[in-house]
Amino acid sequence: MRTHFLAVLEALRFHNRSEQGLATIPENAWPALLKATDSSHLTLALGVSCRNSLPESIRSRIDRNLAGNAARYDRLVVLHSQITGAFSPRGIEHVVLKGLSQWPYYSDDPRQRPQYDIDIYVPDESISAAVTAVRDLGYEPVSDTPDPGADHLPVMIRKTGWTWRGDYYDPEMPPSLELHFRFWNRHTMRFDAGDVTQFRRRRTVRQVGGLEFSALDPADGLSYSALHLVRHLLGGDLRLRHVYEIAHFLERSADDDSFWSRWRETGLPSCRVMEGIAFRLAAEWFHCNLHARAREAVERLPAAVKRWFSLFALSPALGIGNPDKNELWLHFCFLNNGSDRRAIAVRRLFPIRRARVVVDAHVPPAKAGAVLRIGRAAGEVSFLAGRVLHHLRALAPTIRGAYLWRFAPSSGSDRKRPSGTAQPENAAATPSAPPPTTAPSIRDPR
């Protein structure tokens, strides 16, 4: 699986790409590989970018996925319109995060971008009214127990009766709704991201698919996407599509001096390290072009972070078949005291908070018969057993990673430009002096 998944990453590069590895994948290996690309949300990108290099049966399968996802997109526009229509008369301030607002910066065609939930930021003073408004539309929380590590209220869904049939791109699959009340959770992450409330104040109006809605300013949107990526990276649940879409943004904006000047002038210095991490992951994995400003953010990453990349850059990408928790050492780079590191290490290595999974949660209680109730109980047991096995499998590789992090010598050959990054036309531009920063202090915690 590792070799085959690396072939997928090579085929999805923006430069120095190679589809030869796809041709070496045997037919009987594709079902397991597609399960991995489905869960990492890369299947559609693979079908769009590499269609002619795929076996006929795989092309047909992904063509069906693309058609199903296009139908889902049309439904998403309608659902967004309903929510906006419920918020506006009540004067509820809100900002659409990710989702529809990602086009055209993070994907060429919104119908080819998988989306499974609707993310909307609502400030504290409006959150109660927002909950009432979406309840009137039929949304209700899956669980009444808040997740202290989340940036949003408990996930909300409509009890439509839909059941899971193994198709990630089922046009009938109803998206969930997440009402966000913050952009960054300092308590959970144990370090600050600066005054991210500025994102709300600088929001703009976008139009997509005939729908008008509030969204983040593009410069703030990139910052938020980087924060979102790093949060999931450090939490061990990064979707590779997050990195691919950042790479898409960087590639498409590599010659856009106007955007990058605004990003530098209005962006938060406290986010620069996290943005640099996101940019370098994108460049390492998908070989995208970088504007001089983005390259500057990568080059100015602290030595401890660069050292993590030299040891573990591919570790998160290959975690599907080879789980580990070596992102823990990257998290340590942001933490300035032992108590925070111990708290994060215990939480990541020995998690005690049990995630809740509800089989066929969209089925209303009145229609949940004995068979479904038994299935839900079995599903929870199976999920819990799978998580225990995952953590046990990750333990030995993480111990090995701890040894490398503690004892491996720092590399003096760490590249100033990320591996495989195509040189942009304006690469000769000389970066100006860095702005003053209020970012958390970063040091090598060996």
Image (cartoon, rainbow, N blue to C red):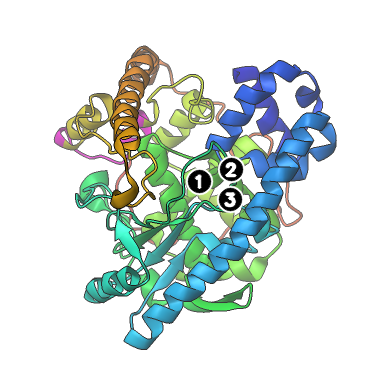
Residue 72 part of the magenta segment: no
On screen, 208 above or below 417?
Answer: below
- First in sequence: mark 3 vs mark 2: 3
Find the residue positioned furthest to the left: 339
List x then y, in percent, for residue 157. Answer: 37, 57
List x then y, in percent, for residue 144. Answer: 20, 52
Separation of marks 1 and 2 at Cα, in angstroms: 6 Å
- The residue closer to the viewer here, 348 or 307, is 348
The residue to which callout 3 is attached is: 114
Tell me if label 1 and label 2 are in contact, CB under 8 Å. Answer: yes
Task: Look at the numbered disc 3 and give the secondary structure of its residue.
Answer: loop
List x then y, in percent, for residue 207. Answer: 59, 77
Q: Is residue 62 left or right of residue 206?
A: right
- The residue closer to the viewer here, 122 or 376, is 376
The part of the chain drawn in magenta is 328-339
Q: Is residue 187 left or right of residue 407?
A: left
Task: Look at the numbered disc 1 and give the secondary structure of its residue.
Answer: helix
The residue to which callout 1 is attached is: 278
The residue to which callout 2 is attached is: 282
Whether residue 289 is visible here, answered yes or no, is no
On screen, 313 above or below 188?
Answer: above
